[in-house]
Amino acid sequence: MQKTYLESSNFALRHELDRLAPTPAITAELATQAQLTDLAAVARKEIPGVNASVAGLNRFQRDDPESIFAFQRRGELLGGIAFLYLNCRGHDALLLDSIDLKNPTREYLARPDEEVSAIYVWALAGHGRAVAGLGNVSAYLRGPRFVNADYFAQPSTIPGRDLLVALGFRRVPSFQPDLWCYERPWNRLPLILPAPSISPGSFAHARH
């Protein structure tokens, strides 16, 4: 996976990512090394033009064991999702389009024991009901290491963009082309309502 892709063949319901309920129908767990070859094959099949490299997935997993998840149903591999966990420098570099998202350097990536500043959806590929496993993954990414990090993604197809919209992503201004962001609910600024208009007579009535 040398480019970032988002695919969804069927995701009709509109739900915010952090409000998706985990489902027992799909197993979404950290990928094992033995699954990487099959995950690369799924990506090549489901994502037009992608050159999925097992060596690349191996490097991702070696650098951060929590970066790749596999979706399974009744023991059948349906697909997977991979993330870049960016530190503060990587977060800034993403917005400024000064990071190589195909092959990011370690200086921009959070260490496995470091709190994540931004979560970049590097690739999502699957078939059948794989997308239902996103609720399981989002529950995992509400853990202490990830909870304060907003999600970012760049859709490469219309279905991918539709999936982002359904999950609550919005396109954001940045030097990075077509960058979308999902702001975690607890990171959003509260809505500031205008103060109610109260006439002087209102206070007089209150005193009575």
Image (cartoon, rainbow, N blue to C red):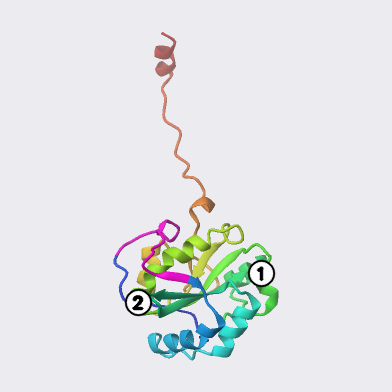
Dividing the picture into quarters, in which one does residue 203 lie? top left
Residue 77: x %, y % from top left: 41, 80
Residue range in magenta is 13-28
Q: Is the magenta region chiefly helix, strand or loop?
A: loop
Of pointers 1 and 2, the one earlier in the residue sequence:
1
Specify the farthest residue to the right.
107
Badge 1 crowding class, 10 Å Cα cut-off, few under 14, some 14 to 19, many 20 or more, is: some
Mark in front: 1 vs 2: 1
Dividing the picture into quarters, in which one does residue 205 lie? top left
Check the image and report above or below for 6 versus 165. Answer: below
**Is 27 within the magenta?**
yes
The residue under label 2 is which amino acid type? Ile
Q: Residue at x 49, y 71 (%)?
A: 29
Q: Which residue is mark 1?
A: 112
Q: Where is the C terminus found, in terms of image quarters?
A: top left
SS at mark 2 in the image = helix
Q: Residue at x 57, y 80 (%)?
A: 101
The residue under label 1 is which amino acid type? Pro
Would residue 170 be seen by someone viewing this image from the given angle?
Answer: no
**56, 65: nearer the viewer:** 65
Residue 93: x %, y % from top left: 63, 72
What is the tally of numbered marks visible in this picture?
Answer: 2
> Does residue 124 appear left or right of residue 127 in this picture?
right
Q: Residue at x 60, y 80 (%)?
A: 60
> Does residue 156 appear left or right of residue 129 in this picture?
right
Q: Which residue is mark 2?
A: 158
Specify the farthest residue to the front.
74
